Structures are given as structure tokens and as C-alpha cells.
Amino acid sequence: PDKPFKAFERSVARLIGGARHWANSGEKIDAESDGVVAQCKLVKRMSLAELTSLAEMVEQEAAAKFKAGVVAVKLRRGSGRASPMLLVVTEATWRRMNG
């Protein structure tokens, strides 16, 4: 069976209608579709500063491909304690996506 982070990346890839990048590809992006690139993080804890940095990085990677950049993050609460996936974009990305 998939490790949890791989399963999460596959879930994000399905959500954006794309494919997961294989782990050792050297890419900063975990999943990509025709219009979206995503960085996926399955975490127990993440600071706002770290999340902001990831959002800025993925925005830059996406802009080079004329796509929207998204950080998909999910809290690992422990066995049997589900949490929702959060999709984070910068304001600039939001404005490009929504005119």
C-alpha cells in the first residue's frame, strides 16, 4: 500500500485533474494538471511563515508555466482522526484565477 504522503499526493492530483510527479524527479512540484501545479504537505505542524514561503514558491513555479500554484496541506492528527485538506493560494494567484 501507498505511504500516507503518496496517497495524499495522488488525492491532490485527482482533485486538480492531473498527475503526481514521482518522488525523485527533482521537481519542487508534487502534482500537476493543465492549469494547476501543487505542492503537497501532510504535516503534524506547520508555521504560517513556512506555509507562506511554500505558497510563494509554488506561485513562482506555476507562473513560469502559466498555471495557478496551490499548496495542498493536510493535518496529520493521528490514526482515526481525520482532517480536511486545505488548498492555499496567494492573493495574486486568486486574482488571476478569478479575474
Image: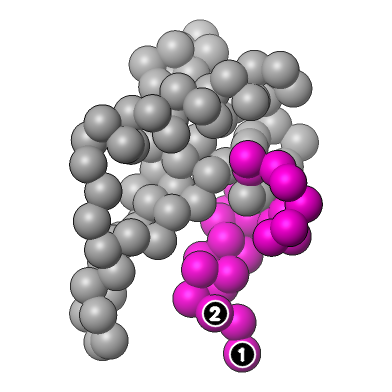
Please give the range of residues in magenta.
1-29
Q: Residue drawn at (62%, 65%), measured in percent from left and top?
A: 10
Q: Is residue 16 visible?
A: yes
Q: Residues within 10 Å of mark 1 (few under 14, many from 20)?
A: few
Q: Quadrant of residue 14?
A: bottom right
Q: Position of residue 59 (x, y in %)?
A: 53, 23
Residue nearer the viewer, 16 or 32: 32
Magenta residue check for 14:
yes
| Residue shown at the point (69%, 60%) measured from the top left | 23
Q: Is residue 19 visible?
A: no
Q: Quadrant of residue 35?
A: top right
Amino acid identity at mark 2: Lys
Q: Is residue 55 above or below residue 24?
A: above
- At which x and y percent is residue 89? 42, 29
Specify few, some or many for label 2: CA neighbours under 10 Å numbering under 14, 14-19, or 20 or more.
few
Q: Are the residues at dot 1 and dot 2 in contact (C-beta closer than 8 Å)?
A: yes
- In percent of the image, x 40 and y 61: which residue is there? 42
Q: CA distance from mark 1 to mark 2?
A: 7 Å
Res 29 quadrant in image: top right
Q: Is 76 a magenta residue?
A: no
Q: Which residue is mark 1?
A: 1
16 lies above or below 90: below
Q: Which residue is mark 2?
A: 3
Residue 67 at x, y percent in the picture? 67, 25
Q: The residue under label 1 is which amino acid type?
A: Pro
Q: Quadrant of the N terminus?
A: bottom right
Q: Residue 78 vs residue 86: left or right?
A: left
Point 51% across, 27% down: residue: 57
